[in-house]
Structure formats: C-alpha cells, structure tokens
Amino acid sequence: MKKLYVSVLWLLMGAGTALAQCNGFIFKIKEGKLAKHDNNGNYRGSITNDVSDFDCNPEYVFVVKTNGKLMKYDFNGNYRGSVTGDVSRVRVSGEMLIVTKTNGKTCKYDFNGNYRGSI
C-alpha cells in the first residue's frame, strides 16, 4: 500500500516536470536543455543540457541528467556539485530532496548529497 501511495504521489507531482518556477525564473525542459525564462517569457539562458528531470529551491536547481546523475547548479548555470547517481526523478520537499532511483526505490537526501533514509 505504501508503494502504491508513493507512486500515485509521484504521478500527481509529475504533471509539472517540464515547467517550474523558482527565484523569479521559469524553467522549462526543451529538447533536453534546461532553459531559463523571466516572468514575461523572455529567454534568459540555459542551465545545462542532457536533462531528464529537475526541481529547484530558492538557492539551487537540482538536475537529473540523462545518464542518471543528480547534479546541483546555481541560477547562473554554475555547477555546484553532485548529489547521487542512478536517479530517475527528483523533488524538493522542504529541506530535503526526494529522489526516485532507477530501481524504483525512493530516498531522501539533504542538499549537500548526504543520504537521509528511504521512504
């Protein structure tokens, strides 16, 4: 039952995977590139490419690359470190990252990449 609940939760949260707003910017994945736009829709550059999923908080953009690595960037596109590997999805929840691994397991990490348990 717990796995079913988590799966439904991810499906509901997944509706916004291609679009998110953080720190006054709107982010969109287009052709694998994470593009940054202002609130008027004007293009303001890209963060990185080879992106399959992302989420953000007021300080960082967390990007799942197509190779499964979860990486952290600032809003100018500067690389700020790796969090973990074998990732298919990421969501920011308060002070934690909720990460779905490629094997289907869901784990929690802090923003510095420290493992904080499974869900």
Image (cartoon, grey):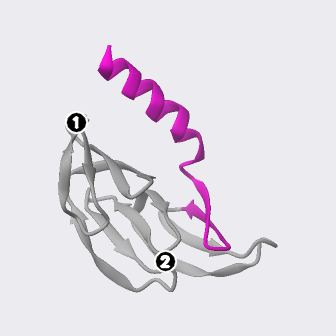
The three-letter code of the residue at mark 2 reads: Ile
Residue ID at (77%, 71%)? 39
User: As drawn, is 101 to the left or to the right of 15?
Assistant: left
Vertical placement of residue 56 versus 52, above or below: below
Give the residue number, with chain letter if any, for mark 1.
105
Q: Quadrant of the C terminus?
A: top left
Give the image quarter of residue 62.
bottom left
Total tally of numbered discs in the picture: 2
Mark 1 falls on what kind of element? loop
Vertical placement of residue 104 versus 31, above or below: above
Query: What is the spatial separation of the Cα atoms under label 1 and label 2, in whole angstroms?
Result: 27 Å
Q: Quadrant of the N terminus?
A: top left
Residue 37 at x, y percent in the picture: 68, 74
**Mark 1 touches mark 2? (CB < 8 Å):** no
Residue ID at (19%, 37%)? 103
Residue 69 at x, y percent in the picture: 25, 61
Mark 2 falls on what kind of element? strand
Question: Which mark, residue 47?
Answer: 2
In the image, residue 70 lies in the stretch drawn in magenta: no
> Which portion, as a residue range, is magenta?
1-30
Residue 95 at x, y percent in the picture: 39, 58
Vertical placement of residue 101 versus 62, above or below: above
Question: Which mark, residue 22?
Answer: none
Residue ID at (44%, 80%)? 74
Give the image quarter of residue 12.
top right
Circle nearer the viewer, 1 or 2: 1
Foreground pick, 31 / 52: 52
Vertical placement of residue 105 versus 78, above or below: above
